[in-house]
């Protein structure tokens, strides 16, 4: 670490003697200046906005090729690559009007292309649009992306499901590093608050080539909020109230940006009582509260940029066991409950060498999980520490050919401190090496890559006294190797048609729970036994997408087929231990297939009306003919949205009516029950309110307007017949100073 710090300092000193800048003017197609256009260079964390006359200035730009994106509401996003030839270069940009959402740079893929130029179809959702929907948690918010659902325990705990795969098959990235928070546990949520998140990107399908093990099913990539524009100070306050849980989410953020240094900090506090079901009763001990703190600092010079961020999150989570029992609006959790602390420290660095560059990401995460059965002494306590690194070298571009190579790995330890033991002390070491290429010509792009990974898992031998017996956990030392490849092709048949074909293999080494569990799992109410003989899960997926887009109409169709070899699943043995059913881990080949389809209509000349519709389906089957567990039901979502301005006091106003129809899920595994279908209605209203010199953003959402009684198929409370949340009115307000 000392060597690394010295290296950063040396590079900063070496680059201090030069001051490069880029300036220009942003206009529309009629040469009229556009003000407040967002201009951002993602790789150097620098941004600004255009002035009233459309001009802008970016200082301290490294020599070589820099990618700059220009985004403005109602206009097509433009990305320009400029190679600095002097200390003061000029870049003028003309933007074209567009009725649809802005095209954004995709960070989660290898070459950070605009979505329209990207080989992989990546879904993107802004945190702002997610909050307008009145969601309670981040996990709930991402379910608005087609092909994404969640396994939930009440309103507090949610785990993302991408095309039928979940748990450790879905890799989560935040602040540019892997989030390691014991995601293999069924009752473990993300442990991240949505405050301070700028957007969410979802890769649906194998992403092992870029991310290694645990990206077999897909990647959830969380982009943190940006720093303030150069030489600006900002204060932000947001507040949301939730009628159903009598909950509150308060957040305040501070930003300050100078020529070379940038700083931000954000504090958030949220609390919720037990959620109310349509019978007007509350589900006992689904209450929770959360404290979250995020901060970051960025430094940039001509040859080097660095961004360091830290996030602390404490969640106090009630674990519902008694269903609808004690009725209370208290936010103080009852027994049993969890206290989960997440510490996330990351360093995101770029080194520029003219035509090439090196990206270096260093990370440290600490997940401290305590589970309380009775009293104030944790019966189960695990600390998961993870050190991670990710280095990617971008070779000089050869014509239209781009090449990227990298190394990636982690060192992880799991240590027990409680009286009980579910998973033994363990050490995990990962190492991966990969290369990928991107070749573009005319309206087509070809991308290919290969990767090798090694994961070693070792545990200690443990003897644990349990009632009248001694349970022995034998030590293991297993190594798992894998080669993965990917091939993608994107082409535009015309101005309106785009198709993408992606072939990719992935893998996942068995996790600690699957290998070593031997005990009662309170969150799932079952006794789980691991299997030391489990091997790698391997899969191969073909994904085909078609898009048709005109000025006023957009249609998409995504289809996939995913073959999984040695799929690991948990199955009941028929035995009973400690009064709970015994489950063990098995392997069998399986397959998943389905897709997402939808359209967006913005009819002319009715420019204020938007009609959006999506349908998503997935089927999961074992080779034996049995269905896979925890597969989401088919869902059809329709949204009618209007946009308007009311004089000078309400700008960018909107109203929305959403109809979400979830079909019956009859394709269930042998230990699941079927789930009937249902339809819920959601409303939304909001916009920017201007009162004199004061401006604030407000939103009102009404979810489950008709107070529909329903049970989501992926609810962990489903087995007890507990209904999902009833009507919930969410009021939000946001101030920027």
Image (cartoon, rainbow, N blue to C red):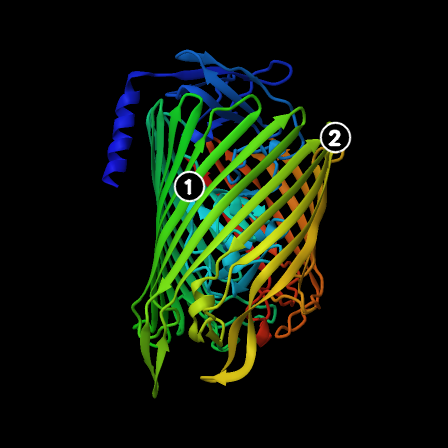
Residue 716 in percent (x, y) is at 55, 69
Q: Residue furthest bottom?
A: 468
Q: Nearer the viewer, residue 109 or 564?
A: 564
| Marks 2 and 1, how far apart at CA | 36 Å
Q: Residue 434: x percent and y percent?
A: 48, 41
720 displayed left or right of 379? right
Position in image of residue 160 (x %, y %): 54, 56
Can I make out residue 366 in this image? no
Numbered disc total: 2
Report the side of 183 relative to 702 (left or right): left
Give the residue at x 42% y 44%: 408
Residue corresponding to mark 1: 407
Between residue 174 and residue 623, name the one nearer to us: 623
In terms of secondary structure, where does tag 1 sit?
strand
Q: Is residue 19 left or right of residue 447?
A: left
Q: Nearer the viewer, residue 151 or 286?
A: 151
Comparing 632 with 509, the one in front is 509
Q: Quadrant of residue 43?
A: top left
Q: Is residue 678 above or below residue 298?
A: below
Evaluate whether residue 266 shows in this view: yes
Badge 1 density bin: few <14, some 14–19, many ≥20, Cα 10 Å: some
Along the polypeptide, which appears first: circle 2 or circle 1? 1
Where disc 2 sits, the SS reads: loop
Quarter of the picture holding the N terminus: top left
Residue 493, labelled with which disc? Answer: 2
């Amino acid at each position: 670490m000392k060597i690394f710090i010295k290296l950063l300092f040396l590079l900063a000193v070496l680059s201090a003697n030069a001051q490069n800048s880029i300036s220009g003017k942003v206009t529309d197609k009629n040469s009229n200046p556009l003000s407040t256009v967002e201009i951002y260079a993602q790789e150097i964390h620098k941004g600004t906005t255009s002035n009233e006359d459309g001009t802008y200035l970016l200082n301290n730009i490294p020599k070589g090729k820099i990618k700059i994106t220009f985004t403005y509401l109602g206009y097509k996003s433009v990305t320009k690559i400029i190679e600095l030839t002097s200390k003061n270069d000029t870049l003028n940009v003309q933007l074209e009007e567009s009725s649809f959402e802005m095209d954004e740079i995709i960070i989660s893929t290898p070459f950070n292309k605009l979505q329209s130029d990207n080989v992989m179809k990546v879904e993107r959702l802004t945190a702002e649009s997610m909050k307008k929907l009145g969601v309670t948690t981040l996990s709930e918010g991402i379910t608005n992306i087609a092909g994404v659902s969640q396994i939930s325990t009440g309103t507090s705990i949610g785990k993302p499901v991408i095309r039928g795969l979940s748990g450790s098959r879905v890799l989560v990235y935040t602040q540019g590093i892997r989030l390691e928070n014991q995601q293999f546990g069924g009752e473990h949520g993300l442990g991240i608050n949505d405050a301070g998140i700028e957007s969410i990107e979802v890769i649906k399908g194998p992403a092992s080539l870029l991310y290694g093990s645990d990206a077999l099913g897909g990647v959830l990539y969380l982009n943190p909020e940006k720093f303030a524009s150069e030489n600006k100070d900002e204060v932000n306050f947001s507040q949301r109230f939730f009628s159903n849980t009598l909950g509150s989410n308060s957040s305040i953020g501070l930003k300050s940006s100078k020529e070379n240094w940038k700083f931000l900090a954000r504090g958030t506090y949220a609390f919720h009582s037990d959620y109310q079901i349509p019978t007007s009763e509350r589900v006992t001990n689904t209450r929770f509260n959360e404290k979250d703190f995020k901060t970051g600092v960025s430094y940039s010079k001509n040859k080097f940029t660095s961004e360091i961020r830290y996030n602390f999150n404490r969640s106090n989570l009630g674990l519902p066991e008694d269903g609808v029992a004690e009725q209370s609006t208290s936010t103080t959790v009852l027994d049993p409950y969890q206290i989960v602390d997440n510490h996330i420290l990351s360093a995101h660095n770029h080194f520029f060498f003219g035509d090439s560059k090196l990206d270096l990401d260093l990370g440290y995460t600490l997940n401290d999980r305590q589970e309380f059965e009775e009293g104030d002494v944790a019966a189960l306590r695990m600390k998961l520490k993870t050190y991670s690194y990710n280095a990617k070298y971008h070779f000089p571009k050869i014509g239209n050919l781009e090449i990227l190579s990298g190394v990636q790995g982690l060192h992880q330890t799991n240590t027990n401190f409680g009286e009980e033991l579910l998973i033994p002390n363990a050490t995990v070491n990962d190492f991966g090496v990969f290369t990928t290429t991107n070749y573009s010509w005319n309206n087509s792009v070809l991308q290919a890559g290969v990767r090798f990974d090694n994961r070693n898992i070792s545990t200690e031998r443990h003897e644990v006294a349990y009632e009248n017996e001694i349970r022995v956990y034998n030590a293991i030392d297993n190594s798992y190797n894998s080669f993965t490849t990917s091939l993608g092709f994107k082409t535009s048949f015309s101005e309106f048609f785009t198709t993408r074909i992606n072939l990719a293999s992935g893998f996942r080494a068995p996790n600690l729970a699957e290998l070593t569990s031997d005990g009662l799992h309170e969150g799932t109410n079952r006794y789980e036994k691991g299997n030391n003989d489990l091997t790698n899960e391997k899969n191969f997926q073909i994904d085909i997408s078609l898009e048709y887009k005109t000025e006023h109409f957009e249609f998409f169709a995504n289809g996939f087929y995913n073959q999984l070899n040695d799929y690991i699943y948990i199955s009941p043995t028929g035995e009973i231990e400690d009064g709970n059913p015994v489950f063990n881990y098995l392997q069998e080949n399986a397959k998943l297939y389905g897709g997402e389809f939808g359209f967006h209509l913005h009819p002319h000349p009715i420019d204020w009306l938007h009609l959006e519709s999506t349908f998503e389906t997935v089927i999961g089957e074992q080779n034996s003919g049995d269905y896979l567990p925890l597969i989401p039901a088919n869902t059809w979502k329709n949204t009618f949205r209007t946009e308007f301005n009311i004089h000078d006091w309400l700008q960018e106003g909107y109203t929305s009516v959403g109809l979400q129809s979830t079909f019956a899920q009859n394709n269930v595994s042998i230990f699941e029950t079927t789930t009937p279908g249902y339809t819920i209605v959601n409303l939304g209203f909001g916009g920017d309110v201007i009162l004199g010199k004061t401006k604030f953003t407000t939103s009102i959402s009404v979810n489950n307007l008709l107070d529909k009684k329903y049970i989501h198929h992926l609810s962990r409370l489903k087995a007890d017949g507990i209904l999902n949340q009833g009507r919930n009115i969410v009021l939000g307000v946001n101030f920027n100073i």
